[in-house]
Amino acid sequence: MSTGTTAPGAQSEAQAAQWVRRMFDGVAPRYDLLNHLLSFNVDRYWRRQTVRALQAQLANPEARIVDLCCGSGDLMLALQKASPARVLGSDFSHQMLRTANEKIARRNVLCKVFEADALTLPLASGSCDVVTAAFGFRNLANYRRGLDELLRVLRPGGTAAILEFTTPPNAAFRSIYNFYSNKLLPVIGGIVSGSREAYTYLPESVRKFPDAPTLAAQFQQAGFTDVRYQYLTFGIVALHIGTRPILAR
Ligand SMILES: C[S@@+](CC[C@H](N)C(=O)[O-])C[C@H]1O[C@@H](n2cnc3c(N)ncnc32)[C@H](O)[C@@H]1O
């Protein structure tokens, strides 16, 4: 398994994580605007599809739902809209959580955020029914530890869902998309956010991230069952879903 994300100048997982956290703190004020702009608003559709895939689990008013790497909170809020249960959001970027908190206050919804590293969550083992991460998992310094932590906090029978950029499987589409993400995206992202580095990191981190079949295999290796994934929008992103087995392996 590729260990995890790497960052400019980082010599260790701790340094990579610190770079990622600082980078997201820096782009937080413009993050939502850029998300919608650079994806032509399709990011909203990707999150809606994630919510749809989890409809059955979200219907339970007792469900404990946690959105990891929640950033400015868009998936957390979409999950809450579809559920009678309270939704928790967690992230290690203080500035992203500030934006999330502003949205929670504006909408007066049943959400609460807490600051934590997704690799060491302050959650009891087996305490969650649904754990999600949208566009955050790819940034973890160690993917195996990320999957282990997801599995740990889920109750037996609980569901993990990871929405993430991936490598489009069609070669012709891939070359058009690569031109967009490697050449145009860093320029537009750099101008609007003021951080060219952040939007150069984005396509690089996607390129180094396991493709969808490999990530599915890694879910299985980590101990998830009923692992499945679907490509969205020609495979620009993939939604992976796995279940914590009822009986330990
Ligand atoms: C691209 S943003 C995605 C935010 C949100 N989920 C969304 O869909 O817009 C990635 C988020 O993951 C967070 N993140 C990355 N690595 C993390 C880690 N190890 N622990 C907690 N949060 C992390 C970043 O701080 C950032 O807010």
Image (tube, rainbow, N blue to C red):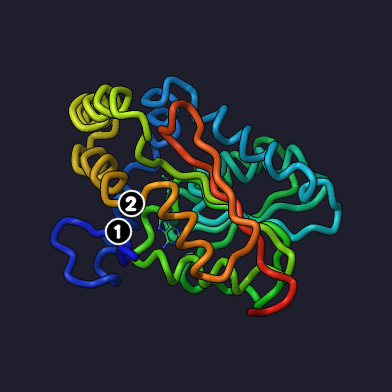
Percent across and percent down for residue 109 are 73, 42
Residue positioned most to the left: 9
Which image quadrant for residue 177?
top left
Q: Considering only order in the chain, which callout, 1 or 2, is on the residue closer to the N terminus?
A: 1
Specify the amino acid type for callout 1: Thr
Which image quadrant for residue 37?
top left
Asked whether residue 63 appears in the rendered view, the answer is yes
Q: Give the structural element (helix, strand or loop) at label 2.
A: loop
Question: Neighbour class for label 2 at 10 Å: few (<14), some, many (≥20)?
Answer: many
Residue plotted at (53% across, 64% down): 220
Residue 191 left/right relative to 235: left
Percent across and percent down for residue 10 are 18, 65
Asked whether residue 17 appears in the rendered view, the answer is no
Residue 167 left/right relative to 43: left
Q: Are marks 2 and 1 in contact (CB under 8 Å)?
A: yes
- Establish whether ligand 1 lies closer than 8 Å to the Cβ of label 1: yes
Residue plotted at (66% across, 61% down): 243
| Viewer-side residue, 177 vs 35 | 177
What is the distance, in whole Å, between disc 2 and disc 1 at their CAs?
8 Å
Q: Is residue 158 above or below residue 105?
A: below
Residue plotted at (29% across, 72% down): 14
Percent across and percent down for residue 213 are 44, 49
Percent across and percent down for residue 141 are 34, 65
> Which residue, given by chain and number where applicable, does mark 1 sit on?
5
Residue plotted at (70% across, 65% down): 128
Q: Give the structural element (helix, strand or loop) at label 1.
A: loop
Which image quadrant for residue 89?
bottom right
> Which residue, given by chain and number where applicable, does mark 2 sit on?
209
Q: Quadrant of the C terminus?
A: bottom right
Q: Quadrant of the N terminus?
A: bottom left
Question: Neighbour class for label 1 at 10 Å: few (<14), some, many (≥20)?
Answer: many
- Mark 2 or 1: the one toward you: 2
